[in-house]
């Protein structure tokens, strides 16, 4: 199917056996995946360009692809960005405000005690031509909050990023991919231009910019499954 394929990554680095969600992709695998995009003629654009094309129904180049990262782990700038930049690809990094410059810990998941990027890292990524987006303030399931709390998360994360980075923050990634009709409306009202979910699929012309589908890439992905995810699985 013709449409924008938005890849979703979390972490790139040495495999951590405690990562029971398998969201850390090995550096060598990540490199091979990026090389595949290049060699197979994928055209990697920014999320900004992609959203514009979807909304204005500008003809989509075949194999149009966007690379995104959720959570804001330090390895994004240390390991992933040099590889991406080696292929001259732009990417979008969705960061959780409270994790910036912190070590993300979770009492339930000790694999999550991973270091996150700080403000200087984010400024550096912007300087290199990448996009920064919001992934909330606290990384909570926004659907579990009252309307007032939802608005606060959407607004505060946008404002904090904008004032610290001196950059318009147009994009949102729903924490845990959790959203409903009210949340998409609130995101629009808050001034976001688009929002990413974790629902798998391709975004064709006229797709709802506040329900963008993504293709999640995980540790277990092989050369074949990566190719399949891009070419076959979601085309049906
Ligand atoms: Zn997340």
Image (spheres, grey):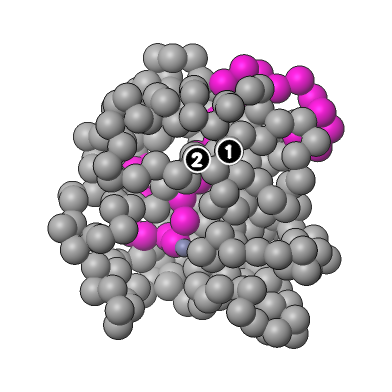
Q: Position of residue 33 (x, y in %)?
A: 35, 29
**In the picture, residue 45 is in which quadrant?**
top right
Above or below, 38 against 214 in this view is above
Q: Residues within 10 Å of mark 2 (few under 14, many from 20)?
A: many
Quick one: quadrant of the C terminus?
top right
Q: Position of residue 228 (x, y in %)?
A: 42, 26
Q: Is residue 132 in view from this perspective?
A: no
Is 200 in front, or is 191? 200
Is 108 in front, or is 61? 108
SS for callout 1 = loop
| Left or right of 77, for residue 158 | right
Q: Which residue is mark 1?
A: 201
Q: Residues within 10 Å of mark 1 (few under 14, many from 20)?
A: many
| Label drawn at residue 215 | 2
Q: Earlier in the sequence, mark 2 or mark 1?
A: 1
Q: Position of residue 135 (x, y in %)?
A: 55, 64
Magenta segment range?
54-81
**In the picture, residue 104 is in which quadrant?**
bottom left
**In the picture, residue 5 is in which quadrant?**
top right
Q: Position of residue 6 (x, y in %)?
A: 55, 38
Magenta span includes 9: no
User: Mark 2 to mark 1: distance in Å?
Assistant: 6 Å
Q: Residue at x 32, y 24 (%)?
A: 224
């Amino acid at each position: 199917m013709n449409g924008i394929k938005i890849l979703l990554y979390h972490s790139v680095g040495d495999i951590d056996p405690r990562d029971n969600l398998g969201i850390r992709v090995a550096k060598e695998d990540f490199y091979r995946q990026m090389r595949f995009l290049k060699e197979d003629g994928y055209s990697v654009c920014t999320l900004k360009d992609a959203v514009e094309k979807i909304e204005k129904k500008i003809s989509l180049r075949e194999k149009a692809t966007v690379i995104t990262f959720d959570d804001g782990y330090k390895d994004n700038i240390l390991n992933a960005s040099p590889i991406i930049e080696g292929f001259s690809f732009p990417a979008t990094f969705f960061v959780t405000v409270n994790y910036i410059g912190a070590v993300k810990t979770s009492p339930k998941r000790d694999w999550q005690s991973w270091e996150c990027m700080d403000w200087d890292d984010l400024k550096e990524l912007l300087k290199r031509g990448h996009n920064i987006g919001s992934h909330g303030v606290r990384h909570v399931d926004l659907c579990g909050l009252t309307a007032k709390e939802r608005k606060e998360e959407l607004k505060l994360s946008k404002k904090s990023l904008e004032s610290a980075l001196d950059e318009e923050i147009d994009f949102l990634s729903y924490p845990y991919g959790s959203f409903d009709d009210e949340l998409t409306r609130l995101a629009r009202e808050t001034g976001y231009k688009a929002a990413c979910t974790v629902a798998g699929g391709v975004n064709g012309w006229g797709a709802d910019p506040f329900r963008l589908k993504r293709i999640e890439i995980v540790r277990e992905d092989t050369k074949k499954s990566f190719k399949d995810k891009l070419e076959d699985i979601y085309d049906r």
